Amino acid sequence: MLVWTLIVGLSFPAVGLLSEGLPPLFLTAIRFAIAAIAFAPLIWRAPDRWPSLPGFFLYAIMGLCLAGFFGAMFSAAHQVSALSMATLYVSVPLLAYMFGCMIGVERADLALLGSLFLGAAGALALAWAGSERVSQGMAFGLAEGLFFLGCAASALYPVLSKWGLKRGWLSDSAAIRTFWSLIAGGLLTGLLGLIFEPVHSLGRITATDLLLVAYLGIFSSGVTFWLLQRGTGVLSPGTVTAYTYLIPFVSMIVLFVSDPETIGWHWLPGSIAVILAILLLLRRSTRQLHPAAAPQTAIDPSARTGV
C-alpha cells in the first residue's frame, strides 16, 4: 500500500503534462482499456479467469462505483475548489469503514477509527497548507454534493471486493479481480463519456499524450488497482483506503523538490499527524498478518506416555 501511495502521488504531475482540452472520461476509459490489455496475458491460462454469474454482477456494480467516482470528479472539477475536493476526499476511509461495518466485512474497532480520524485531520491540515495561495476556499453546494457521492462510490469499491471474496464470488487472484474491475469500469466510464463529452475532442490527442496515457494506464491504473486488490485480500477496507492520507504528503514532497521556497512550519502539523496515523496502521496491519502465537495449554501427563 505504501508503493500504491507513491505511484498515485507521482501520477498527478504526469496528468498535468497532458494537452489541454482532452476529454477526461474518454481518457480514463482508454487508460482502463490499456491496463486491462496489459493484465490479460497474466490471467489468460488461469482456471478461474471467467467469473461466475454472481461475480459478473458484482464486477458490474464495482465498475459502476469506479465510473461514478471518475464521472463525479470530472463533472465537479471546474465547479469545486481544490480545497473542497481534498476535504471531501478524506471521507473515503471513514466511509469505507462505515460501509464495511454495515455489511459485515469490518469489525468495530476504536483503535482503527482513531487512526482514521488522525489521518483525516492530518490530510486536511496538509490540504489547508497547500491552498494558502489559492483564493478559492471551502464551500458546499450541488457540485460538492455530487463529488461527495463520488467519494462514497470510491469507498464502496474495496468494501464490495472484500464482500465478494468472503462469499466466494470473486477470484482469489488479485490479477483476475483487477482485470475484470478494469473491464467493467472502462466500459461504464466510456458510456459516461459518450453521454457527456464530444467524441471529436479525441482528435486533439498527440503521440506524447498517447505515451502518457499508456504510462498512466499501466502504472496509475493497472498496477495501483492490482496493489489495491492485493491489500484488500488481507486487510480491512478501512485500513486499505486509509493509505490515501499519504497522497497529499507525497504531493507535498514533490512540491518541496520543485519549489523549495514553499517549505514552512505550517506543513509540520499535518505531516506529523499523517505519518503517525500510517505508523499506527502499519503496526495494526502487522498484527493482523502475523498474529502472536497462541499460548500453549498445559499437557496432560498421560499424553507423554501415550496412554
Image (tube, rainbow, N blue to C red):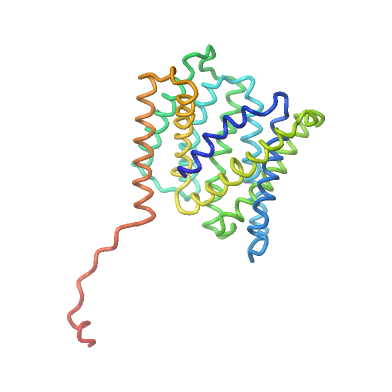
Q: Position of residue 93 (x, y in %)?
A: 47, 38
- Taking 81 as reference, is 117 left or right? left
Q: Nearer the viewer, residue 288 or 26?
A: 26
In the picture as drawn, the residue positioned furthest to the right comes out as 200
Camera sees residue 153: yes
- Taking 271 as reference, is 145 left or right? right
Q: Quadrant of residue 17?
A: top right
Q: Position of residue 280 (x, y in %)?
A: 34, 41
Q: Nearer the viewer, residue 201 or 169?
A: 201
**Residue at (67%, 61%) from the top-left corner?**
44
In the picture as drawn, the residue positioned furthest to the left comes out as 301
**Residue at (39%, 45%) from the top-left corner?**
108
Q: Position of residue 236 (x, y in %)?
A: 45, 48
Camera sees residue 52: no
- Taking 262 as reference, is 293 left or right? left
Q: Nearer the viewer, residue 66 or 257?
A: 257
Q: Quadrant of residue 206?
A: top right
Q: Position of residue 296 (x, y in %)?
A: 24, 67
- Taking 9 as reference, is 213 left or right? right
Quadrant location of the C terminus in the rendered image: bottom left
Is the residue 264 above or below the residue 1 in the image?
A: above
